[in-house]
Amino acid sequence: MRHPHVKICGLKSREMIDTVLSCGGKEVGFVHFAPSPRHLAIDDMAMLAAYVGGRAQVTIVTVDADDATLSAIAAKVRPDTLQLHGHESVERTAEVAAMTGLPVMKALAIGSAEDLQEVAKYQTVADRLLLDARPPKNALLPGGNGVAFDWSILTGLDPKIDYMLSGGINANNIARALQTISPYGLDVSSGVESEPGVKDAGLINGFFSAFEEAMHSMEQKRAS
């Protein structure tokens, strides 16, 4: 049985990084997108990435960023992964990977089975895929809206496809998510916030506890 790794995204402080690492988090995400309440300047992301110091993977989230911005992130932050969370085309995704020399994770909005057609297109150019809920109408942000989608849509995917599940995941629904599908990773942001952009140590701890409990329960059922 696959044991997904957890990425906590939208972190903004050393204290919350420490909380995630103490819970066994394997990946942390910083957001560079001015409209987001989780936005960080490039220099701030660089300082936090240096603080992580290789204890976890560092992913930087961008939204339709230009070449200059992506080059600056690659040079100053030197993340493990660039997450493209905008309307980047297949061609643009390949271009970013070649230009920066960094692994790229492309976020795709999922609202129906038809949206899975995009998976086949992007998996040839992206190192990983992030399957997120389609934003509500009039939403200002492409992600971090606290909205989940029908995870059963993903049961038809090739199990070998490396994807992270995102969109409204929290301590209350993580068990149901893992009972429905088996992603390689879990991306959590708003589900561990007390308000948009404000991570909560208690909620982070609670999520990891619920995650491990769900995994343990599934392993016991499989063994019985």
Image (tube, grey):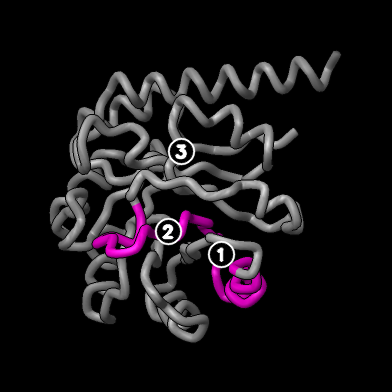
Number of numbered markers: 3
Query: Residue most toward the right?
Result: 224
Whichever of labels 2 and 1 marks the residue nearer the N terminus, that label is 2
Residue numbers of the magenta segment: 115-143
Percent from the top left, x then y, of residue 76?
A: 22, 62
Residue linked to disc 2? 81
Residue linked to disc 3? 169
Q: Residue at x 70, y 37 (%)?
A: 2
Residue 54 in view of the camera: no
Nearer to us of marks 3 and 2 is 3
Disc 1 from disc 3: Cα separation? 23 Å
Q: Residue at x 21, y 28 (%)?
A: 15
Q: Residue at x 65, y 18 (%)?
A: 216
Determine which quarter of the picture holds residue 50.
Answer: top left
Residue linked to disc 1? 127
Percent from the top left, x then y, of residue 197?
A: 20, 42
Q: Secondary structure at mark 1?
A: loop
Query: Seen in the image, is 196 located left or right of residue 170?
Result: left
Determine which quarter of the picture holds residue 141.
Answer: bottom left
Whichever of labels 1 and 3 marks the residue nearer the N terminus, that label is 1
Evaluate if marks 2 and 1 touch, with contact meaning CB atoms under 8 Å apart: yes
Whichever of labels 3 and 2 marks the residue nearer the N terminus, that label is 2
Nearer to us of marks 1 and 3 is 3
